[in-house]
Image (cartoon, rainbow, N blue to C red):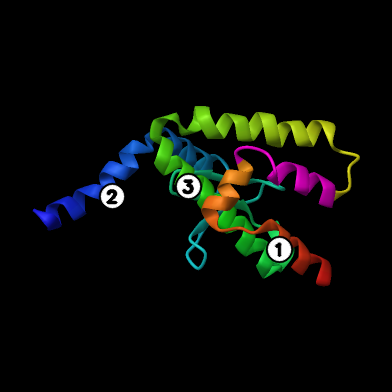
Amino acid sequence: MGTLLNRLIPGIIWLWQLPQHLLALILIHLWNATYNPHHGIWLIDKKGIGVSLGSYILLDKRYGCGNIDRITTAIKHECGHSRQSLIFGPLYLLVIGIPSAICTNLWDRLFHTNWPSARRERWYYKRYPENWADMLGGVKREEWAANKRRK
């Protein structure tokens, strides 16, 4: 019985997050994403984009410009969103995805264009659901910001 259940759990989890997974597969196709097995993410040619949809993480291939701390932080943050997806299942896009895209991301890109990047970043990651994704992914922004200033 235990091995049967162990075989069923991944499929059940995939179905629980079905709307996110379908959207991810569509975006992977539309954006000609390439899989990076080293990091377990999909790389896209969309400037500044990082998105987590279920168990799929899509990240701008130029993100961090080779800065491993920045890339690791971004992946951890997106893993936090993946955990949110596990919690909310089919409601994730309504509860997390739309608020993240509109209330945080779009708002920032429209109204904070004159802000310095450090201020924009602080504002963005202090908002729901980004701050929660950081917490779930184990991202400590203050430590990361201090390391960034030292380099």
Any mark on residue 144, and which?
A: 1
Vertical position of residue 121 compared to residue 27: above or below: below
Does the stretch in magenta take in 135? Answer: no
Q: Which residue is mark 2?
A: 10
Amino acid beneath label 2? Pro
Q: Earlier in the sequence, mark 3 or mark 1?
A: 3
Can you tell which of label 3 and label 1 is closer to the viewer? 1
**Measuring 75% from the left and 69% from the top, which residue is drawn there?**
147
Across and down, in percent, residue 68 comes to: 66, 69
Can you tell which of label 2 and label 1 is closer to the viewer? 1
Q: Secondary structure at mark 2?
A: helix
Task: Classify residue 84 as left or right of residue 134.
Answer: left
- Whether residue 130 is visible here, answered yes or no, is yes
Across and down, in percent, residue 31 comes to: 58, 43
Q: Earlier in the sequence, mark 2 or mark 3?
A: 2
Looking at the rendering, which quadrant does residue 20 occupy?
Answer: top left
Q: Earlier in the sequence, mark 2 or mark 1?
A: 2
**Measuring 41% from the left and 40% from the top, which residue is drawn there?**
87
Q: Residues within 10 Å of mark 1 (few under 14, many from 20)?
A: few
Q: Secondary structure at mark 1?
A: helix
**Measuring 88% from the left and 48% from the top, which residue is drawn there?**
116
Q: Residues within 10 Å of mark 2 (few under 14, many from 20)?
A: few
Residue bounds of the magenta highlight = 118-129
Q: Nearer the viewer, residue 44 or 13?
A: 13
Q: Nearer the viewer, residue 17 or 27?
A: 17
Q: How far is disc 2 from disc 3 in space, using C-alphas? A: 14 Å
In this view, the residue farthest toward the right is 114
